[in-house]
Image (spheres, rainbow, N blue to C red):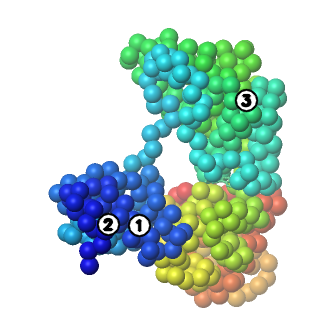
Amino acid sequence: MDNFGDKCARAMGGLTNKTWELAREAIRACVTEENFSTYFRPLRFVEAREGRMVLAVEDAFFGDWVRTHYLELIESELKKVCGEPVHLVIDVRERAPVNRKPLASLQADPRAKTAQSEKLALNPNYVFENFVVGPSNDMAHAASIAVAQEPARTFNPLFIYGDTGLGKTHLLQGIARDIRKKWPGKKIVYVSGEEFTNQVIRSIQNREMDSFRAHYRKACDVLLVDDVHILAGKERTQEEFFYTFNALHTAQKQIVLTSDRTPQEIKRLETRLRSRFQWGLITDIKPPCFETRVAILQRKAERDRILLPAEVSQYLAQLVITNIRELEGALVRLAAFAGFHRKPLTIEFAEQALQGIVDTANQGVSVSDIIDLVADYFSVDNNEILGKRRHRAIAHPRSMAMYLCRKHTDFSFPQIGRGFGGKDHTTVMAACKKIGQAVESDLRIRKQIEQLERRLPIG
Ligand code: ADP
Ligand code: MG
């Protein structure tokens, strides 16, 4: 049964990177090409010793997935290649953040400066072409494009804020990429608020404050700071940032900042910084409306070559409402699951696959908690909500409660239907869709939902 690969690996003496490469090729023959490139190609060989091999992956989600679904397969292929049992460890090792290099060395090596913007670790998917524009983000998108086309000509600074998972980093990296393409000579510094803070701390400790300042003030034409709200309460970092900001702004260098809230809402932010953040344009990104969510899913499915029927994308778009990262995560998980079971993507399949996965953070609230809360808010009887009367005075609170259950619990549409006295899942879906749309277009309903959400036990 020995083949050439086996011989090679054994000849090389035990477990090596080569063993892994051979096993991976063998696995390629047993899984779909899509699964192969999603789960196996990104696995990197780290080390192997005494029957134990460590492979690394950058993303915790994929790490989990590989561990639960493919560990046995990989171990058995490794065994075939090397002839003895292999204990496999899948390790999650995130890629080193951008600009981790000590600042001094950036300054010391003249090539480092010019090569710096080429080395920006940008996510290849975070480009403007992949960004779906809708009413929730069109302003932030247009402003980002304007800034990328003419840095420091239009809005300076550009301040983009919005909840997590709505596309701030995507836009910021889109700006970085476009500027780099259009002006290869411009020095771009792309840094997270956290990394900036760490750099300040390190520079103080290593007495490198001068090179830190030089790095930001002299070797920077475009400063992109992601999650600047993290500077809240960090006085020394804020002070450094203030001087950097001033120096760059005076020199007409473009500054773009993202944050999870407005400058006003960032607590413990120096007034002088707050006021500077407001000098240019402040624009927000809101949760996308239903249609934008569907478009985002379809765009992602096309890009990843996932066969996604329209009704499933609509189902997913109703399921995951407020966070695009989760929305995409649900799609990836679903596609992986379908690929693994060799099943087509249908709504039933989606329900089963995603059960208990989406929005797990809010497990604490039950359907009946929400019904009680809503009944109390609208002064109707709980039993009316569970009943069948269709009068608006009852039907509206019922729909609102269903929507809140969908948004704040892990329950599937059929489960929610059961919690509402045995309603059909299509009734729940219709209610969620109706309220979801009304939240976008009807101020009164949005206010009601906000007030109700404030009364929820958590989240
Ligand atoms: P944030 O920085 O606001 O937390 P990200 O920029 O990291 O959010 O976006 C989360 C995920 O959602 C990313 O994969 C991103 O590509 C995707 N995404 C966000 N907005 C859009 C959009 N409008 N079109 C396509 N994908 C989007
Ligand atoms: Mg981000």
Determine the residue located farthest toward the left in the rendered image.
50
Q: Amino acid at mark 3?
A: Trp
Q: Amino acid at mark 1?
A: Glu
Q: Residue at x 60, y 36 (%)?
A: 226
Q: Residue at x 37, y 60 (%)?
A: 21
Dot 1 falls on a residue whose secondary structure is helix
Q: Marks 1 and 2, Cα distance to the nearest angstrom?
A: 10 Å
Report which residue position mark 2 lands on.
Answer: 5
Asked whether mark 3 lies closer than 8 Å to ligand 1, one says no
Report which residue position mark 1 lands on.
Answer: 25
Q: Residue 415: in sight, yes or no? A: no
Q: Are marks 1 and 2 in contact (CB under 8 Å)?
A: yes
Dot 2 falls on a residue whose secondary structure is helix
Dot 3 falls on a residue whose secondary structure is loop
The mark nearer the N terminus, 1 or 2, is: 2
Q: In front: mark 1 or mark 2? A: 2
Quarter of the picture containing the N terminus is: bottom left
Task: Give the percent coordinates (x, y) of residue 382.
Answer: 62, 78
